[in-house]
Every structure is written in structure tokens, then in C-alpha cells.
Amino acid sequence: LRWLKEEMKRSQSLIKRTNHLHDAELVNAKKEVEKVKRAAKLLIKAVHKKGKDKAAKSEANAESERRRRMKSQQTIENMIQSHSAQIDLLQRGLRHGTRDANDSR
């Protein structure tokens, strides 16, 4: 009977130790899961931020290109106006030159 009681105590002690180890493993596993969750969140934030940065850079490049094209278009318009004005001056000069030549005959 004494032997049976001692065996029961040893079994209970073994069960308690096993439960304690199991609980400790669960706690460690939960900590690891939390670490993985935090790392995943940080990774998602980093990817999202990179996407935002890339989109902002792309938008800035598009805006810069739009401004460059507008400036080029304005330059072309100014050159056309200047050319038209020069042609008008030449035509007037030719008309006046032709009249002056006709008047002197």
C-alpha cells in the first residue's frame, strides 16, 4: 500500500512537471506568435510606405514632365508669334518699298 501511495505521488509530481513544461511551452509559443505578428505588421507598414513613396515620386515626376511640356509649348507659341511679327514687318517693308519705288517712277 505504501508503495502504491509513493507511486501515485511520483505520478502526480510527474504530471505537474509535465503540465508546467507544457504551460511554459505554450507561453513561449504565444510570445513567438506575437513576435511574428509584430514583424508582419512592420513589414506591411514598410511595404505600404514604400508604395506610397513610389506613388508620390511618380506623381512628382509626372508633374515635372507636365510643367516641362507646358514650358516647351509656351516657348513654341512665343516663337510662332515672334516669327509672325517678323513676317508682318517684312511684308509691310516690302509693301512700302514697292510703293516708294512706284512713286519715284
Image: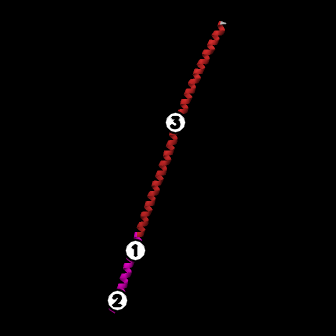
Which type of secondary structure does the marked residue at label 3 adopt?
helix
Label 1 – label 2 distance at C-alpha: 26 Å
Is 15 one of the magenta-colored residues? Answer: no
| Circles 3 and 2: CB atoms closer than 8 Å | no
Residue bearing mark 1: 83
Of tags 3 and 2, the one toward the viewer is 3
In the displayed structure, 102 sits above or below 50; it is below
Q: Which residues are magenta?
A: 78-105
Report the residue that reaches farthest toward the left: 104
Of tags 3 and 1, the one toward the viewer is 3
Residue bearing mark 2: 101
Please name the residue shown 45% across and 62% down the image.
69
Q: Amino acid at mark 1?
A: His
Among the two numbered marks 3 and 2 on one chain, the one whose residue lies closer to the N terminus: 3
Q: Amino acid at mark 2?
A: Ala
In the displayed structure, 80 sits above or below 61; it is below
Residue 25 in percent (x, y) is at: 57, 25
Among the two numbered marks 1 and 2 on one chain, the one whose residue lies closer to the N terminus: 1
Residue 13 in percent (x, y) is at: 60, 15
Residue bearing mark 3: 38
